[in-house]
Structure formats: structure tokens, C-alpha cells
Amino acid sequence: METAGAADLRVSARTGAGMEALRDRLAEVTRRLINQDGPPALTRPRHRAALASALANLERARAAALPELRGEDLRRALYDLGRITGHVGTEEVLDAVFSQFCIGK
């Protein structure tokens, strides 16, 4: 990943200053890494649902008045993205297995 120019980004967690520039830079680097213009194709319904949930959580985080609530919404968005990328913890896998199957009946 290219890091040239990264030092000139200034972001404030307190005021939100610089967030738009950070998002723009992340989008630019991502486009370069995947060499694709436009959104990626999501062919699986569960991926589309996870992405929609991540977007909703990010929108809630943006509107949250308290940092604790913002952090929780960001954690949930990260979890949703992990469902797409495969970075989901053991507990989540076990919860999914036991919620979808009738075991021991």
C-alpha cells in the first residue's frame, strides 16, 4: 500500500475534522489496490444484507451523540464487514451453527 503523503492527513476524533479527506484517501487507495472503478459486484444475498447492515451501523455511528454509542455502532459495522470477508470469531460461528440446526432433539 502506498503511504506517500499519508503524513499530511490530519484527523480529529473529537471534532471530526479531516474525516472527509480520510475517506477520500481510503477510497482512492482501495480503488488502486483492486484496480476497479465502480462498486464491487456482490452476488450473494447474505453479503448484500451484511453490507446494508454495515452501512446502517455506520450511518448510526455518524449521528450518535455519545462516543460510547458511536463506538458500538462502529464495532457492529466491523462485525458486518467481517461476515463478508470471513473474519468472524469462533463465538459467532458457533452461534450461527446452533441457531440454524436442531441438535439433540
Image (cartoon, helix red, strand yellow):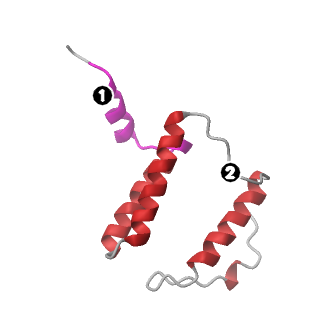
At label 2, the amino acid type is Pro
Q: How many marks?
A: 2
Q: Residue at x 44, y 50 (%)?
A: 53
Q: Residue at x 35, y 62 (%)?
A: 72
Q: 42 or 7, which lies in front?
A: 42
User: Residue 54, percent across and down?
Assistant: 47, 53
Residue labelled with disc 1: 98
Whole-percent x, y for residue 48 in the image: 53, 42
**Disc on the earlier residue, 1 or 2:** 2
Q: Secondary structure at mark 2?
A: loop
- 80 to the left or right of 105: right
Magenta region, residue range: 83-102
Q: Position of residue 41 (x, y in %)?
A: 67, 42
Query: Secondary structure under badge 1?
Result: helix
**Amino acid under disc 1:** Phe
What's the residue at 70%, 78% (across, down)? 6
* Residue in the image at 51% along x and 84% along y: 12
Instruction: Mark 1 vs mark 2: give the one in front.
Output: 2
Q: Residues within 10 Å of mark 1 (few under 14, many from 20)?
A: few
Q: Residue furthest top?
A: 105
Check residue 75 in the rendering and tell me which mark sits there, or answer none.
none
Read off the residue under disc 2.
39
85 drawn magenta? yes
Report which quarter residue 90 is drawn in: top left
- Measured from the top left, where is residue 25 in percent x and y? 68, 71
Confirm whether the magenta stretch covers residue 57: no
